[in-house]
Image (spheres, grey):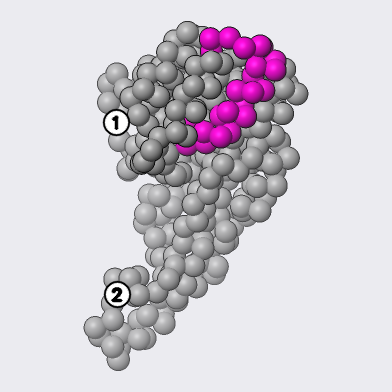
Amino acid sequence: MSKRVNDTISHLLAQLDVRPVLLDIGASGAPPRIWDAIASRSIYVGFDPDSREMREISNGHYHKAIIVNEAVVAAEANEVSFYLTRSPFCSSTLPPDPEALSDYLFSDLFAVERQAKVRATTFNSLFDRLGLAAVDWFKTDTQGTDLRLFNSLRPGIRDRVLAVDIEPGLIDAYIGEDLFVNVHESLTKSGFWLSDMKVMGAVRMRRATMDKLRLTHQDIDERRIQKAVRPSPGWCEGRYLRTPDWLAQKQFEQREYVLLWIFAMLDGQFGFALDLTAVYESVFGKNAISASMTSEAVRCISQPHGRLWRTVE
């Protein structure tokens, strides 16, 4: 994103005195880079009970940063079983499904090294503790429970979420997990549209087959197989944005329209940003804010070269 767009976004956030609330569930690693442009004005809340890969957020990067080393659950509970796997990125409150995973070469990453009881909380309990009344961008990667967690938000908060980053499975990696088909149906019925999706995968080959192959072909190791064999779809990273119709139906204020416009611009959805501006003007009339929104989106579309957007991270 160019400096000029970032300056426009910063100006709009300051003009409306908006502090976006960014929720990062399953926060191993760094926060999403797409949030960098709004970080200094945003409140970041990150969750991850498996802190083996948790990185410190640099001082001053976010207006306020809260790290919660508790598991978040859909129903009230003081603690929950957490399955710590060989790869911390595969740890979950759901047990891995060894039978389904056995068809894939990466199954060993899901091997449970230990099962622990960890402190648990619900969003609603935590928000009461923190005094948070809204979530603007909901990013979740909980290994199988993304949809049920989103739906566990109390309606007054859930209805105001403007963007959702979600990572549902396409295969049964966990027992009882929320799959993409369930996620997509639920979100599109709740006033979201799919802005971006990146399909990820793994080599479908049983480890026992590879071990047997290596007895006669010692030059073929796992690294060579990973390079030679096309991965099969296993999960996806999706980004959903609210529709303008949803905002109009709920009679939201300028804050939500402008913030959704900002999220659309960060996501490279300049055409949608112009659609949203037109709806904004039909509700609030033309003003300096809508003029700025229009000119910035048009300028981005008119760029002679270079790509200003990035895909889901």
Judging depth in this view, the residue of 120 and 110 nearest the camera is 110
Precedes in sequence: disc 1 or disc 2 = 1
Vertical side of 289 occupied by 100: above or below:
below
Residue extent of the magenta highlight: 265-289
Q: Which residue shows up at 47% across the image and 8% down it? A: 15
Under circle 1, the secondary element is loop
Residue 56 shows which numbered tag? Answer: 1
Q: Which residue is mark 2?
A: 224
Q: Position of residue 299 (x, y in %)?
A: 44, 28
How far apart in space, not on screen, are marks 1 and 2 (Cα)? 35 Å
Viewer-side label of 1, 2: 2
Judging depth in this view, the residue of 121 and 32 nearest the camera is 32
Q: For the residue carrying disc 2, how many other residues have a C-alpha within 10 Å: few (<14), some (14-19), or many (20+)?
A: few
Q: Of helix, strand and loop, which mostly describes the magenta segment?
A: helix
Q: Is residue 226 visible?
A: yes
In the current view of this chain or complex, which residue is farthest to the left? 219
Q: For the residue carrying disc 1, how many other residues have a C-alpha within 10 Å: few (<14), some (14-19), or many (20+)?
A: few
